Amino acid sequence: MKILVTGGAGYIGSALVEKLISLGHEVKVIDDLSNGFIENINQKAEYLNGSILNDELLSRAVKDVEAVFHLAAKIRVEEGEVKPDLYRQVNIDGTLNLLKLCNPFGVKKFIFASTAAVYGEPSDYPVSEESQTKPVNVYGRTKLEIDEYLSKSAKSLGISAISFRFFNVGGAVQNFKQEWLKIKHEGATHLIPSILRSSEAVPLLIYGNDWPTSDGTPVRDFVHLSDLVDALVGSLNYLENPGHEIINLGTAKGSTVLEVTQAAKVALKREINYKFAPRRAGDSFALVTSNNKAKKLLNWQPTKNLINILEDASKELTSNH
Ligand SMILES: NC(=O)c1ccc[n+]([C@@H]2O[C@H](COP(=O)([O-])OP(=O)(O)OC[C@H]3O[C@@H](n4cnc5c(N)ncnc54)[C@H](O)[C@@H]3O)[C@@H](O)[C@H]2O)c1
């Protein structure tokens, strides 16, 4: 199948491109490299260098493709609060530009990278696709706006669409040459990169140890990049009739931040130096999803655990930085 991956030089996009090509698909990539690496893009992919905000380039990207995985986005929660216009422009206007082209160019399948951030600070444990959406930041609001647009318009656009709401994605994958695809670590504030960067001199900061959880630290759901990519690829077989589904992607297993730190001690074979800091505004104490819908519709099953995630993330860091 001929497939477009927007954001195909990024963390998830490049792993997806690698997998699609290994399965024999013909892949095009559009990416402006604002947060990706050109060397991550498999050379068998046709690469268009530029922004999804460039209509002419986007038309070339969409031409002749049957399916689009739309991953290009601005992704940093904190940055979104300071640059809301940029986040709306790329994440909303850019996506609407792309959707406008689907019908005229005959795109049949549209897979959108949405996020757990649309649930905000959920009271449901685990979260499900029916849980209330109440994003607490600009990033989450931009993604929710597209989820809602797709629910309303996918049928009339003639596309079979899924919004995948990713929970915490971690780990790394290798390309066909057994090289680790590069991960951008600068500016990343997520837990696993922060653990990898921690040292005797720079402790990991754990925000809040007074949450109502087993050890007082927040609970998160970590899914390995390769499992996530399997779900994305699997959706190509599922998508058929015009319409829209929302599917949460996670392992349904919660780990507290302290449990992740303990797992890191095993996986990285070193002590993890940490200290507690005050809670951060907008953090939720428990973000774990049910994955019954993904399992049922896509016949998907995550296979990797937290130790695999930490080991692979550490190998990527050692080999690429
Ligand atoms: N990584 C996670 O844990 C996670 C969780 C939830 C949702 N998501 C979503 O998954 C998608 C991929 O995330 P990621 O972690 O791989 O991020 P990433 O930043 O590594 O990948 C996004 C890619 O899009 C490109 N890009 C940004 N703006 C662009 C533009 N205007 N035109 C063309 N390309 C542009 C970047 O250069 C980058 O290569 C995003 O849509 C993100 O919101 C990721």
Image (cartoon, grey):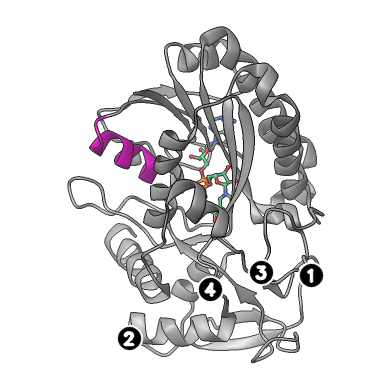
Which mark is first along the chain, 2 or 4? 4
Q: Give the x, y percent position of residue 313.
A: 38, 65
Residue at the image point whose x is 53% and y is 81% from the top? 202
Which quadrant of the figure shows ligand 1? top right
Q: Which quadrant holds residue 43? A: top left
Q: Are marks 1 and 2 in contact (CB under 8 Å)?
A: no
Which mark is first along the chain, 2 or 1? 1
Which mark is first along the chain, 3 or 2? 3
Residue at the image point whose x is 42% and y is 12% from the top? 64
Q: Is residue 227 magenta?
A: no
Residue 253's label in the rendered image is 4
Q: Give the x, y percent position of residue 103.
A: 59, 12
Using the numbered discs, state the Cα–Cα distance from disc 1 to disc 4 in whole angstroms.
Answer: 16 Å
Magenta stretch: dominant secondary structure:
helix
Residue position for label 2: 269
Magenta highlight range: 13-24
Q: Is residue 301 above or below residue 101?
A: below
